[in-house]
Structures are given as structure tokens and as C-alpha cells.
Amino acid sequence: MPFAAKSASNEQLNHERLTPLQRLFGSAQIFAFSLTFMSTWEGMCTNMWFALYNGGPQTFVWSLVIVYCGALCQSASLAEMASIQPIAGAQYHWTHHLAPVRWRRFITWMQGWLTWFGWISLEAGIINITAIILQSLVQLNNPDYVAERWHTTLFIFALLLVHGAMNVYAFWLIPWIELLAGIGHVCLFVVFVVVLVTLGPRHSARYIFLETSTSSGWDNSFISWNLGMLTCAWSFTGFDGALHMSEEVRKAKQAVPRAIFWTIALNGVFAYAMIIVILTVMGSIEDALDSDFPMIVILQEVTGSDKATTAMVCGLFCISFSVCLASIASVSRLTWAWARDKGLPTWFSVVDAKHHVPSRAIALCVVTVGLLALLNIGSTAAFGAIIALSSLALYFSYLIAISCMLMARFNRDDPVKLGGWNLGSYGPYINCFALVYTVWVMIFLPFPNTLPVDAVNMNYCGPIFGAVLIFALASWFLRAQKHWPGPNVEIVRLIIGQE
């Protein structure tokens, strides 16, 4: 087929069968989407248990400094690539664009599957936290209520149905919901800080910055410290959420890179301030570790009121609810893009002509996470293993993309053409630091959090990640190596040309 005819055919396919998405997000809305999606100070409130379990206050307060610097460099590196190609596939598209020609298809295939599995796992983790907040509110206001694992699963099902329906039938509202959530994210931060600082007790600076405590069984303080750091690292994972919405953002080459970089820059400041406040007013570490949701214990002690505690935790729930909306939107766009490029069955690549959303991709994500939530009924360890996959898989996707970018910078034969948002001469140094940080965190992600290790507390992150790698490799050698052409270049040109 002549090139012109082939190009016209592909363009017709995109317009007729793959109905284009609508660019509903402006610069402020995608920034609010990204800012709320990360919700790092809220993450410090909901995930603080793990940092106190491994390392104590010192780990919590100092590890964030390292995580903040690393996440800034990661986000800057990915933002630079987003300025070149603002497209829903993000990491795997950039890998195909920047990787050496000889290995391009193989690396892209691996990148696509690892990114997709990582995002499904991340969505499961986000919806699980939201369900736990809701369940904790029920328990707070009904002392006789006994929380069961199957209750959590039912909460997850209900949230998935609501969020899935909103993403299909009322997606036009989501940019405005996320804008309001972004404003709420900032305002609620002020409320928490004022209430905690005004009413709470005071720990000394020595307690905040030097106190150590390890309840996990790890005698090696170095390993324990790095395991505690993963609390902060998890809260800074998934900043690529806004990247997968690129095809629905106006002036995406400028808006998306700015959104993800300044999201990390601002949220890091909020997160550090919240850690200082929490450690200043909290009671004993033992009391915090005795609760599944330590923030409720802290708020009860500070306010002396269950009603005030309920109101403040409801604020956290509202933010977490909007994060779930955003995460389903983001992972469904990645699913749709990966299906469009024939990584997943192309049946999931069709966009609903009436609602202008990839409804089949949304349904796949909702059903998949719902099925994974069934594991929680039988074993929290099994469901926790799936959730733990998110950080390792997504960090691996960052590692591949940033490595390809760094190699492309030094390719004298075909140097990479940077977009309007770029790191200039500092790019190689920032990319290198991002890679070092990414590898460092990946080393500790598979470590068990508790000693001695048994079937319940085992960290199954490594084995699950290995299983995903084996699946991707097997599918490559059995089918994709001979039959998969790689991402559709004509669709990429069409989308970039719309900018």
C-alpha cells in the first residue's frame, strides 16, 4: 500500500472506529487533577504506620528529603519526555521513540505490560485505602462494629461501581470535580495544620528528628531505615497519572509537563510540613502502631471529640474519593492506548461515540480491580502482594524510559529533539540522579517488612513482579516477536499534529 494511502487509512481508522477523545482539561484543571492525585500530605496521614513501624520518627522526617529530591528528578525527566510526545501511552511510547532501533520493539513491549500491571496494582491500592478510610469512619461512629475483610471488599465493590459509572456517564464533570478537589486539597491542609498545631501537645525537636524505633524485627538499622523510607516513596509513586490524560488536555505540550513537575514540587512541601506536625502532636509510637488507622487516634487525642475527628477524616475521604476517580480515568486511558497499539485486544480500544470515553477500557479496569479485591476475603497478604507490585512495576517503567532518554541525549547520529519544556544542559545530571534514586528504591521494595518471615507477613512484591516479567517475556516470544509491529506511528503523528 502506498504511504499516502496507508496514512489516510490509519487516520480514517482513528476517526471512525477509534472516536477521538475530547480535550476537556485546561491547564488549571490538569494541574488540579495531578495535584490531588498525588495527595502526598494525605498519604502521610494514611500511611504513617509503616514509617513508624520501621525506623520511627527519624526515618519518617529525614527519608522524605531523599524521596522528594528523587521524585523531583523523576518527574522532571518524564515531564521533558511529555513535552516531546504528550500521548496516553506515555512511558511505552517514549521508550519506542527513544530506545535503540535494534531493541526498540522488545523494550517497548516489556514497558507496556509492566506499566499496565503497575497501574492496575496502583488502582487497587488507592481504592483499598479509600475503603479503609470509609470503614474506619463506620467503626469510629459505631463502637460495636467489628470490621471484617469481606466488608472491605464490599466497600471496594461499591466504590468501583460509583467511580466506573461516573467515568463513563459523567466524565465531563470530572475536570471540574478535580479542580474543586485541588482547591480542597490545599484548604484541608491548612485546616489540619491549624487544628493539630493549636490543640495538640508538643514533642521536642530531638524526638522529631532523632528518635528511632523499630518494631519490625529488623536489627540492621540501615535496612530498617530504608524500609521505612518506602512509606514516603509510595506516596510519590504514580505522578505519571496526568501523563496518561494528555490526549484530553488542551495545549498538552506545555500544560502536562508543568502540571506533573509542579505537582511534585508543591506536594513535597505540604508532605514535609505535615510530617513535622504529625510527629509534633502525636502520642506514643506504641499507641499509633496499635491502630490500623493511626491518624484517627491522633485526631481523637488532639480534638477530644469524635465528631470533630469524623469531620476531618471525612475531608480525607473526599480527597481519596476524587483520587479514585482520577486513577480510573488515568489507567483506563493507558489501557485504551495499549489496546490501540495491539498490546491488549483491540476490542478495548474503541471509544464510546456518545460519551467520548473508552468505556470498554474503563470496564476492564473496574472488573480487574474488583476481581483482585476478592483476594482480600481469603488473605490480606495475597491482596497486599498485588498492591505492593505497583511501586516496583512503575519504578521499573520510570527506569526504562529515563534510561532511554539518557542514551538518546548522547546519540550523535540521531540526537533527540527536545520539546518546549526541557532541562537544557542540566538534563543528563538530573536523569542520572533520577536513575540512581530509582534503582536504590527498587532494591528495597522486595524486602520483607517484618522478621521473622512467615506466609502472612511475607513481601510477595518480588515474586509477583517476577511473574509479570515472565508473562511479558513469554507473550513476546510466543506471539509479539513475530506479529507485533510496535506502536502505531501514524496515530502518534496524528495526535502530535493536533497540538
Image (cartoon, rainbow, N blue to C red):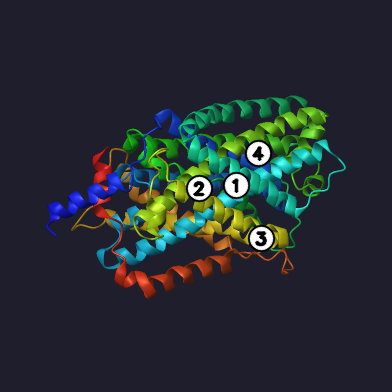
Quarter occupied by residue 243: top left
Q: Is residue 206 left or right of residue 399?
A: right
Of marks 4 and 1, the one in the foreground: 1
| Distance Cα–Cα, label 4 vs label 2 | 20 Å
Q: Name the residue that disc number 4 marks.
A: 275
In the image, what residue type sits under mark 1?
Ile
Label whose residue precedes the other's in the sequence (3 or 4): 4
Identify the residue under disc 1.
126
Q: Residue at x 29, y 45 (%)?
A: 16
The residue indicated by pointer 2 is 238
For image coordinates 52% across by 30% down, the residue present is: 177
In the image, taking residue 106 as reference, residue 274 lies left or right, namely right
Residue position marked by numbered label 3 in the rendering: 375
Mark linked to residue 335? none
- Category of crowding for the residue at label 3, using alpha-carbon neighbours closer than 10 angstroms: few (below 14), some (14–19), many (at least 20): some
Within 10 Å of the Cα at label 2, are there few (<14), some (14-19), or many (20+) other Cα atoms? many
Lower position in the chain sequence, tag 4 or tag 2: 2
Kind of residue sitting beneath label 3: Leu
